[in-house]
Image (cartoon, helix red, strand yellow):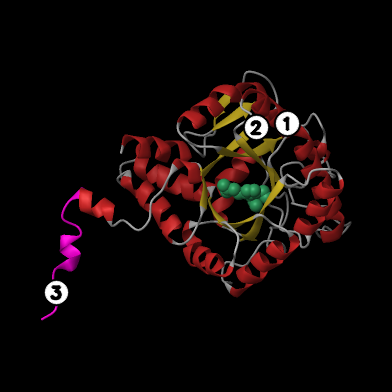
Amino acid sequence: MYPRTRGRRLRETEAIRSLVRETRLSPSELVYPIFVIEGEGEKREIPSMPGNYHFSADMLDDEIGELKGLGINAVLLFGVPGIKDAFGSEAYRDAGVVQRAVKSIKAQHPDMYVITDVCMCQYTDHGHCGMLTETGRVENDRTLEYLSRIALSHAKAGADMVAPSDMMDGRVGYIRDHLDENGYKHVGIMSYAVKYASAFYGPFRDAAGSAPSFGDRKTYQMDPANSDEALREARADIREGADIIIVKPALAYLDIVRRVKDSANIPVAAYNVSGEYAMLRNAVDSGILGEDAIMESLISIKRAGADIIITYFAKEIARKLRRE
Ligand code: PBG
């Protein structure tokens, strides 16, 4: 005879289910993305991402306090500048929108871990992630100089970690050298190593005003049909000195999260992006799906192998975990 009912016995009550549960989520594994804008006294809801806001730097104190109260210890900052130009020069200005936000968070909450997105697309007038040639091609190597300048200005403002999301080749090593040479060896790099050219970034591009004015990002972001390429990208960034690598998006790429996790020997973060947020948010808010769909989705990302989840649901999930 063989035991026919083992599965059932381990599902009998919540006590035994939680005893044998293989995957758990904790607020301390979540990173909350925050959009900072110019101005003062501003806190405005982002229409395409209900429940998320644009903040001016002076309005971050309460938000960070709330996050800490929920057990969320890390934020990822995105800047929405007032001015754009061909060089994205607002991105590396010492008094730029992100730099001011980092300083104000660190002054009030030195224990909040501050990660800054390093990219040019919000800052360039053409909306591409790098410098362009006269014919409109993104110039990889010239862009590296700008990215490392942006990263250094974030480090100077007090960022704990920089997160290059531009997908230029060689930028992790370039940024690492630049930070080291300038006395910022202690500042980490969380690289968007595996970033797909995805339609799920739509609401973010609205929120950040970063949609390209012509063309698309397919020459520097990855083809959704590829999986081996993800391992090559991850390996390159690890070799160049990334401390953490990101797979992005998350939900349509759980197989990639698993493959990258199995092959990488450093922490892997999955970015549950704006379109994934909007999709679930709308389905739950309109009653098409029950709200448990949110926890189920995040647990699936963890189960796939993510050590860290970057998510716009961070506060909501942390509240739910607290209630349980
Ligand atoms: C900037 C950047 C993007 C996202 C993070 N950093 C957009 C893009 O590549 O167009 C997307 C995040 C999200 O959708 O939540 N390069």
Is 102 left, or right, of 278 in this rendering? right
Where residue 141 appears, as percent x and y from the top left, is 85, 59
Residue at point 78% right, 58% down?
Answer: 173
Q: Which residue is mark 3?
A: 3
Q: Which residue is mark 2?
A: 36
Q: CA distance from mark 2 to mark 1?
A: 7 Å
Task: Looking at the image, tell me whether mark 2 or mark 3 is earlier in sequence order.
Answer: 3
Q: CA distance from mark 2 to mark 3?
A: 58 Å
Check disc 2 and report its element: helix, strand or loop. strand
Residue at point 73% right, 34% down?
Answer: 158
Judge whether residue 5 is colored magenta: yes
Q: Which residue is mark 1?
A: 97
Where residue 117 appears, as percent x and y from the top left, is 68, 44
Secondary structure of the magenta portion, mostly?
loop
The verdict on label 2 being within 8 Å of ligand 1 is no
Q: Quadrant of residue 287?
A: top left
Pick out the residue farthest to the right: 134
Residue at point 56% right, 71% down?
Answer: 225
Judge the density around disc 3: few (<14), some (14-19), many (≥20) Cα neighbours within 10 Å: few
